[in-house]
Image (cartoon, rainbow, N blue to C red):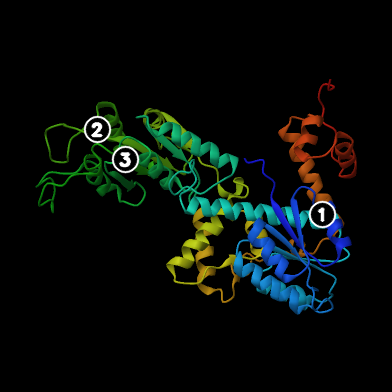
């Protein structure tokens, strides 16, 4: 990652508050503007990721219209910038109006520096995710696999493994829940291989009746059975020189598993009704959502075939274990859906982002795509809400508003526990990860009731 700090623009006519905000947000390169003209000039010159916007600006410091006009022009000039309205003007209507104009969030004066830091950090993270999404959509990321959208470490490990396996001739077994993108990764394996100029042929072993699957795979000669009026090549022979993708191989009948094993051992096939062996050069990539070891124990899958198709196994993490990838994918899918349906580009609202991050996604990427597509079609405004995604919680405990002190304490506790887990309990390293001193970390551990790690004394 680049060490270059992110720019942040403060649009505020009070010099004292400008200094206060600069001090509170020292993790950013902060520029200040006092008027609409200065703000637009600073936007062009510095290209900030985040703007803290006051509503009361000259020549109408006691009103709000100049502030709202500034928000409109800023977002027209830079649609991706995250505008956080910071104002002393009371009233829910101002907050709602700012959000409708496209502002990211709303914070009232007097400013709570800790709360503002949380809001700004979250806005910065969303800005980075959207920037990464745009790079991926434009194909400008040098390490991205075609069609694979993700920035989380679990998915990056999968992508690195795919890149390493692609140039080889290894038979690859892709393991993962339904909807995790196994076919997309199979296509990436083929596209990055030396066989990319040859065909990639896919067959879903669960979607074809057992009686037809053999002829689909191996082909048949004329007269092999009733209705076989001409010679027909099977999927294996059609993929000659390229890649054969056997999706849901865990659902293949046992009788056919034996014939597939023989092909993998001898690399030749015999069409139904035929008498001669036909040599075929094809790479096998298989995928399943089944636990094949459990299927072997039940006698439903051949152990020898398992070892043949799984020279290398790749476990694909479900979406719920991919961190911020859900938001990254949602933004990408939303862009695609708006283009497909001829709609103006929509954005995810803050509540939609929070709902996406909080949902377990049992249907994985397929479920996310379904919800995003439906919301893109039905939403009438510029922002997609959690309700548009049908992710509103009906659980009263989840829906309750927590006091900000408790929200901060939970966030701090989670961050401290994660840092200690990542560093194996090393206080010095955890403090460095969190960007605090060791005494501050000890204070955080005491305030959040985080137990001290049990490890050898530090030297």
Confirm whether residue 394 shows in the render. no
Q: CA distance from mark 1 to mark 2?
A: 65 Å
Q: Earlier in the sequence, mark 2 or mark 3?
A: 3
Please identify the quarter of the rendering in which residue 93 is found: bottom right
Q: Position of residue 328 (x, y in %)?
A: 57, 53
Q: Which mark is residue 281?
A: 2
Q: Is residue 234 above or below residue 329?
A: above
Give whichever of 162, 63 is nearer the camera: 63
Give whichever of 23, 381 is nearer the camera: 23
Mark nearest the camera among 2 and 3 is 3
Q: Position of residue 22 (x, y in %)?
A: 82, 54
For numbered disc 2, what is the local secondary structure? loop
Q: Is residue 153 above or below residue 87?
A: above
Side (left or right) of 437 relative to 30: right
Give neighbour class at mark 3: few <14, some 14-19, many 20+ (Cα, 10 Å): some
Identify which residue is drawn at 65% across, 55% down: 126
Side (left or right) of 343 relative to 67: left
For numbered disc 3, what is the local secondary structure? loop
Q: Earlier in the sequence, mark 1 or mark 2?
A: 1
The N terminus, quarter of image: top right
Instruction: Tell me the residue that label 1 is attached to.
Output: 22
Q: CA distance from mark 3 to mark 1?
A: 53 Å
Instruction: Tell me the residue that label 3 is attached to.
Output: 196
Confirm whether residue 345 shows in the render. yes
Q: Is residue 314 above or below residue 22?
A: above
For numbered disc 1, what is the local secondary structure? helix
Q: Position of residue 71 (x, y in %)?
A: 69, 71
Give yes or no for contact between labels 1 and 2 (Cβ–Cβ under 8 Å). Answer: no
Identify which residue is drawn at 81% across, 30% down: 428
């Amino acid at each position: 990652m680049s060490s270059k700090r992110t720019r942040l623009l403060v649009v505020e006519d009070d010099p004292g508050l400008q200094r206060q905000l600069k001090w509170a947000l020292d993790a950013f390169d902060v520029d200040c503007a006092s008027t609409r003209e200065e703000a637009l000039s600073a936007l062009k010159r510095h290209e900030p990721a985040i703007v803290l916007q006051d509503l009361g600006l000259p020549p109408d410091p006691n009103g709000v219209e100049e502030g709202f006009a500034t928000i409109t022009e800023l977002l027209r000039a830079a649609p991706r910038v995250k505008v956080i309205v910071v104002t002393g003007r009371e009233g829910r209507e101002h907050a709602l109006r700012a959000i409708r104009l496209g502002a990211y969030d709303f914070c009232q004066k007097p400013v709570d520096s800790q709360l503002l830091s949380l809001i700004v950090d979250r806005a910065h993270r969303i800005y980075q995710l959207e920037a990464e999404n745009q790079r991926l959509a434009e194909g400008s990321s040098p390490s991205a696999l075609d069609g694979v959208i993700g920035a989380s470490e679990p998915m990056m490990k999968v992508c690195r493994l795919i890149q390493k396996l692609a140039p080889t001739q290894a038979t690859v077994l892709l393991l993962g829940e339904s909807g995790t993108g196994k076919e997309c990764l199979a296509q990436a394996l083929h596209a990055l291989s030396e066989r990319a100029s040859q065909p990639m042929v896919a067959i879903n072993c669960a979607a074809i009746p057992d009686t037809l699957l053999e002829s689909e795979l191996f082909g048949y000669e004329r007269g092999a059975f009733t209705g076989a009026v001409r010679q027909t090549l099977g999927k294996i022979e059609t993929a000659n020189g390229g890649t054969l993708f056997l999706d849901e191989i865990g659902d293949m009948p046992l009788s056919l598993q034996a014939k597939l094993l023989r092909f993998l051992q001898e690399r030749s096939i015999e069409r139904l009704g035929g008498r001669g062996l036909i040599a075929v050069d094809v790479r096998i990539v298989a995928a399943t959502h089944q636990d094949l070891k459990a299927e072997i124990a039940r006698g439903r899958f051949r152990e020898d075939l398992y070892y043949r198709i799984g020279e290398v196994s790749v476990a694909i993490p479900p979406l719920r274990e991919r961190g911020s990838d859900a938001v990254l994918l949602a933004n990408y899918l939303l862009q695609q859906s708006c283009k497909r349906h001829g709609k103006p580009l929509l954005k995810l609202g803050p509540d939609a982002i929070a709902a996406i991050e909080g949902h377990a996604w049992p249907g994985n990427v397929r479920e996310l795509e379904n919800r995003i597509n439906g919301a893109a079609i039905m939403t009438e405004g510029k922002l997609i809400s959690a309700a548009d995604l049908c992710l509103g919680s009906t659980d009263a405990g989840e829906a309750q508003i927590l006091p900000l002190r408790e929200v901060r304490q939970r966030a701090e506790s989670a961050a401290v526990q994660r840092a200690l887990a990542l560093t194996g309990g090393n206080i010095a390293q955890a403090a460095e990860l969190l960007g605090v001193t060791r005494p501050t970390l000890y204070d955080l551990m005491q305030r959040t009731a985080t137990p001290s790690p049990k490890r050898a004394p530090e030297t």
